[in-house]
Every structure is written in structure tokens, then in C-alpha cells.
Image: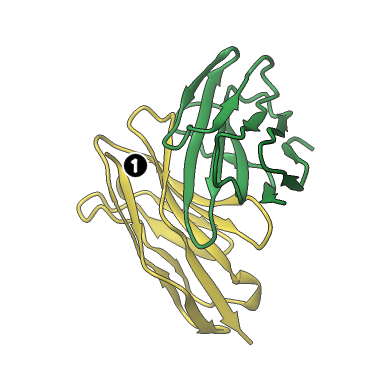
Chain colours: A yellow, B green
Amino acid sequence: GDSVTQMEGPVTLSEEAFLTINCTYTATGYPSLFWYVQYPGEGLQLLLKATKADDKGSNKGFEATYRKETTSFHLEKGSVQVSDSAVYFCALSDNYGQNFVFGPGTRLSVLP
Amino acid sequence: DGGITQSPKYLFRKEGQNVTLSCEQNLNHDAMYWYRQDPGQGLRLIYYSQIVNDFQKGDIAEGYSVSREKKESFPLTVTSAQKNPTAFYLCASTPGRYQPQHFGDGTRLSIL
């Protein structure tokens, strides 16, 4: 079945450091790909998405590019802030676009 | 503002008791979902519903039940058959295929 793998956390960075969170997937067909962010005690919020190969999703300084050849969707940000501390989830929609598979999440802590 | 409302935010269950978690959305979305999140883990699908009066089991449906009598409402009952119900429960909805999910702020269920 479909699956999503994320790099193990927690990830701890200093403010203004460069962020990369790796995400790779296994899926049949052409899934849509998503990054969600979860702050403590809250639900998930959509951060960005990409629906086809070579699409780049971007939002709030975060970017991710849909790489079909490497089945990857790595999340990047050039300069993280303390307020970016949260758990980040990579996800895909299945071939029918009706169900979703989530990675285990990566906790990011940004120190001032 | 449109969104998903989950209630209560915190819920306590006694042994042998059934409890119901509420999920209401005013986004006019057709599809709704229930997920369970355990500490440090990703989301696991309990049930989902694509249309009113129809729903399907997810990966971990045992010990749970749902109903979808109205488009805007998708309550989840945690029955006494669910032996380890302590978790964070998230409700989500989508407007259509391949669209990202919108999430509520979750209900944290604990055992007394």
C-alpha cells in the first residue's frame, strides 16, 4: 500500500539556520503531496501542497518540490524562526484522491 | 468564519463507558474523517465518510462507531470495546478529491 517516510526527529536548530526535512513516498499512480504543521494542542494546518511532478509548493518561506524521479517531497526553509517550532507532517492523497496517508511527523525545535 | 469545531476539548471516560466526540463543519465539505494520534506518532484513520448516510472503516475501526446523518456532522463514539482509548482525536474534512484536508483542534480523551 501507499506509505510516507520522514526523517527521524527531533530536529533542533538555531534561529536563522537552514531547514531541511526529508520526505519520501511510495504510491501507485500520481498522488498529490502535502506538508502540514501542528502546534502543541492543536489540529493540523496545511502548510503547502503540490499536485503533479515538478510542482513547487510554497508558503510562509517554506518550499517543497514534487520530485517523481526520486519519489520525494523535501521541506525547506532558508531561515527558521523560533515561531516555526512545531511538528511537521508529510502526507499524500491516494490514487483516488479520497484518502490520505501521513508520515510519522518530525518535531522541530528552534532555539533563540 | 468557516471551519471545523470539535468538542469537548478534553474528555474523560470511565471503565465500561461509551463516550461520543462531536465534529461539526460549516465548510459545506462532502468528505469527513476521524483520526487517532498517539504521542510521537502520526495519524491513523478510524473512519471516513464521503457522503451523508455512508461511511467506511479505516485502519483501526475496532471499538469505534460513527454516524453521518447530516452533511455537517460526523460524531465518533468510543465504545467500551476500545481497550486503549487514551489518545488525541482529530476530525478533518475535504471539499473534494485530491483537495487538502481541513482539521479541527482535536479532542483529548483520557481514562479515569
Question: Where is residue B110 shown, x and y percent of the image?
Answer: 68, 51
At horizontal 44% and vertical 32% (from top left) the residue drawn is B58
Judge from the rendering whether residue A51 lies leftward or rightward of residue B96; answer left or right: left
Quarter where residue A93 is shown: top left
- The residue lying furthest to the front in this view is B16
Residue A87, placed above or below residue A35:
below
Question: Where is residue A59 shown, x and y percent of the image?
Answer: 55, 57
Quarter where residue A83 is shown: bottom right
Judge from the rendering whether residue A71 lies leftward or rightward of residue A84; answer left or right: left
Q: Amino acid at mark 1?
A: Lys
Question: Where is residue B88 shown, x and y percent of the image?
Answer: 62, 50
Residue A14, placed above or below residue A9:
below
Q: Write down the chain letter for disc 1.
A: A
Q: Nearer the viewer, residue B21 or A104?
A: B21
Instruction: Give the number of callouts.
Output: 1
- The residue lying furthest to the left in this view is A69
Q: Nearer the viewer, residue B72 or B19?
A: B19
Judge from the rendering whether residue A6 lies leftward or rightward of residue A105; answer left or right: left
Screen quadrant of the N terminus of chain A = top left
Question: Where is residue B24 shown, x and y percent of the image?
Answer: 73, 30
Q: Nearer the viewer, residue A87 or B41?
A: B41
At horizontal 48% and vertical 75% (from top left) the residue drawn is A78
At horizontal 64% and vertical 30% (from top left) the residue drawn is B77
At horizontal 61% and vertical 50% (from top left) the residue drawn is B86
Q: Nearer the viewer, residue A99 or B16?
A: B16
Q: Secondary structure at mark 1?
A: loop
Residue that mark 1 sits on: A52
Mark 1 Cα shell of 10 Å, populated few (<14), some (14-19), many (≥20): some
Screen quadrant of the C terminus of chain A = bottom right
